[in-house]
Amino acid sequence: MRDMENFDFNIRKFNTSNIYSYFLTHDDATKQDLVSNLNLTLPTINKNIDYLSELGLIQVCGSRGQTGGRRATTYSLCSQAKIALGLDITKHHVACVAVDLYGKIISFKRTWLVFENTDAYFKSVSDLLKDFIADNKIDKKKILGVGIGIQALVKSDNKTVFYSQIMDFGEDAYNRFCKYIPYDISMFNDAKAACFAEKWVDKDIQNAFYILLSNNVGGAMIINGQVYSGNNFRAAEVGHITLVPQGRLCYCGQSGCVDPYLAASNLSQDDLAGYFKTLETTTDSRVLDDWDRYLYYLASTINNVRSLMDCDIILGGYVGAYLEPYLEDIKKRVLKISTFDSDTEYIKLCSYKSESIAAGAALHYISQFIKTI
Ligand SMILES: [Zn+2]
């Protein structure tokens, strides 16, 4: 008898979750849409529409049908029934985003704040977040949690920082955030968070490698639809592949890593938009030579990753957002040095042109919430 009850419960949950998923991927739906697309009976649809409406997760949004005929009521997602917040913490900035249940960024703000491993800094971050919530009139009761993207490696508990050479977070960063931020908190490596955001946009991604080309170079990989962390949570650290033996010094202490060749600072210290604007028209051979060298190293890195992983490669981060006009050039360069490939459709540009890290960190909470329905 207990088995039968469990079975009924599981079926009910499965149906509810399927119906809710339909609203997450469609602007609106009538009951008839749900009956025909989900292969469920009308009484099941009715029960679930009532249930999801009571929870405040869906709403009546209009009607559809022939004028004169009986119009069917349409329902849609209450996209802001819950909201997740995301932070991207870098050496000089803190970005705050709010993300709705579709995963859409509904507000964001980037503020200059120089990182230091002090209590005062963590309090300042909390104050920024408090202002962000107030300025955007976000209902605190709807906040699922705060995802924090940081330039450090974090264990799967999303609390323990274990490698933070770029920014000295220290081991108690999680507790210090918790001291001032009164919401559930999870911390993520920046590239892993950005990669999660890309996967959110393109749900069909099965295997892909994400290269974060920002002030430092990070990476993340998706295998069988999941972000893969490795045995020691250090997977996909493409920034520390040896690109040029005995080459430039990397912040990690080694020489010749990808990071010192592909970090955005090779192109511009603080005005990447200005750099790419200049690049469009410049005839300055020094600028063009530097760019040519950057693309040479980028093509080598892409080829290395492709040879190893045999999957799509997504170029993201600050630089990735500007690569559209240069994509064909990059593809040609990679093809020239490729052993196996005869086409380079696998090289893709990021969907998020900004705030992918903060959004990805926030999406963790949206994804978790959706799984509970
Ligand atoms: Zn390195």
Image (tube, helix red, strand yellow):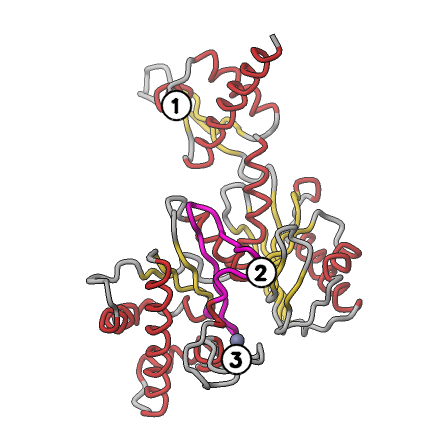
Q: Nearer the viewer, residue 326 or 209?
A: 209
Amino acid, disc 1: Leu
Amino acid, disc 3: Asp
Residue 326 to residue 244: above or below: above
- Contact between marks 3 and 2 (CB within 8 A): the answer is no
Front label number (2 vs 1): 2
In which quadrant is the C terminus drawn?
top right
Which residue is labeled 3 in the image?
Answer: 270
Instruction: Kindly report the distance in space between the C-alpha atoms of the residues bearing marks 3 and 2.
Output: 22 Å
Q: Earlier in the sequence, mark 3 or mark 2?
A: 2
Q: Residues within 10 Å of mark 3 (few under 14, many from 20)?
A: few
Q: Earlier in the sequence, mark 2 or mark 1?
A: 1
SS for callout 2: strand
Which residue is labeled 2 in the image?
Answer: 189
Instruction: Kindly report the distance in space between the C-alpha atoms of the residues bearing marks 2 and 1.
Output: 37 Å
Amino acid, disc 2: Asn
Residue 215 located within the stretch drawn in magenta:
yes
In the visual, does 75 lie left or right of 108?
left
Q: Looking at the picture, how far across and down is residue 32, in whole percent?
A: 38, 19
Q: Residues within 10 Å of mark 1 (few under 14, many from 20)?
A: some
Q: Looking at the picture, how far across and down is residue 293, in whole percent?
A: 35, 83
SS for callout 1: helix
Residue 16 to residue 366: above or below: above
Q: Looking at the picture, how far across and down is residue 93, in whole percent?
A: 62, 70
Which residue is labeled 1 in the image?
Answer: 38
Q: Looking at the picture, how far across and down is residue 317, in whole percent?
A: 46, 66
Front label number (3 vs 2): 2
Residue in the picture at 44% in, 52% down: 222
The answer to which quarter of the image holds residue 180 is bottom right
Residue 359 located within the stretch drawn in magenta:
no
Which segment did they paint magenta? 213-237
